[in-house]
Amino acid sequence: MAITFNADEIFEMAETIERNAAEFYREAAKKTGDKAVQKLFTDLAAMEDSHCQIFQEMRTQLGPGEKEQTTYDPENQAIQYLQSMADSHGTEGKKSRSEKLTGKESMQDIYAIAINAEKDSVVFYTALKELISKDAGRDQVEAIIDEELGHLVLLKMQLANLGQG
């Protein structure tokens, strides 16, 4: 059986991904003694919080038809699958799909984890953009993709700078 999601469920997944990302960056900020790196991660967490708020707002703007269940699912398996996808989406907010940061990771490791997470987010949101109408917030998703790409570039620059230090 194919599992499909309505716009409300997709935005709910995106909110979870953004909350995980913000949590990851806050945790990464705690794991470094470098004030500049702490600020970078704290700023990235704030941006992810902003993305989450955008998705929450988009959900409130959905019409009744966009919140309706699109498949017969009396046991809420689709919702459980959706939550599982959001919780394990790439490594966003986690060291890996099942591990949080321990504090033993190097800065290179933390940047690599963040870079992979941002790449996964760009892929996810690019697919998401194709599933929603312009009225449901496609332009906002495009703006979030642009920000996530900016995060990716920034993190890659930071990682490259570590190798030069």
Image (spheres, helix red, strand yellow):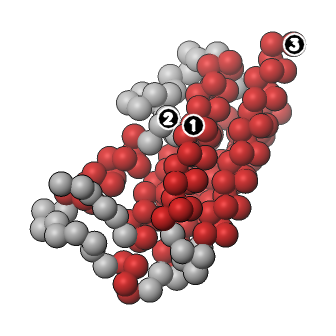
Name the image quarter holding the N terminus.
Answer: bottom left
Q: Amino acid at mark 2?
A: Thr
Residue 139 visible to an observer of this rendering: yes
Residue that appears at 81% across and 13% down: 163
Label for residue 117? 1
Q: Secondary structure at mark 1?
A: helix
Residue position for label 2: 91
Residue 50 visible to an observer of this rendering: no
Q: Nearer the viewer, residue 43 or 55?
A: 55
Q: Residues within 10 Å of mark 1 (few under 14, many from 20)?
A: many
Q: Secondary structure at mark 3?
A: helix
Q: Amino acid at mark 3?
A: Gln
Contact (Cβ within 8 Å) of mark 3 with mark 2: no
Name the image quarter holding the C terminus.
Answer: top right
Q: Nearer the viewer, residue 108 or 103?
A: 108
The quadrant where residue 118 appears: top right
Contact (Cβ within 8 Å) of mark 1 with mark 2: yes
x, y percentage for residue 36? 83, 33
Q: Give how far apart the Cα atoms at labels 1 and 2 are.
A: 5 Å
Label for residue 164? 3
Judged left or right of residue 78, residue 135 is right
x, y percentage for residue 46? 68, 53
x, y percentage for residue 103? 56, 21
Q: Give how far apart the Cα atoms at labels 3 and 2 are.
A: 26 Å
Residue that appears at 80% across and 21% down: 160
Q: Secondary structure at mark 2?
A: loop
Q: Residues within 10 Å of mark 3 (few under 14, many from 20)?
A: few
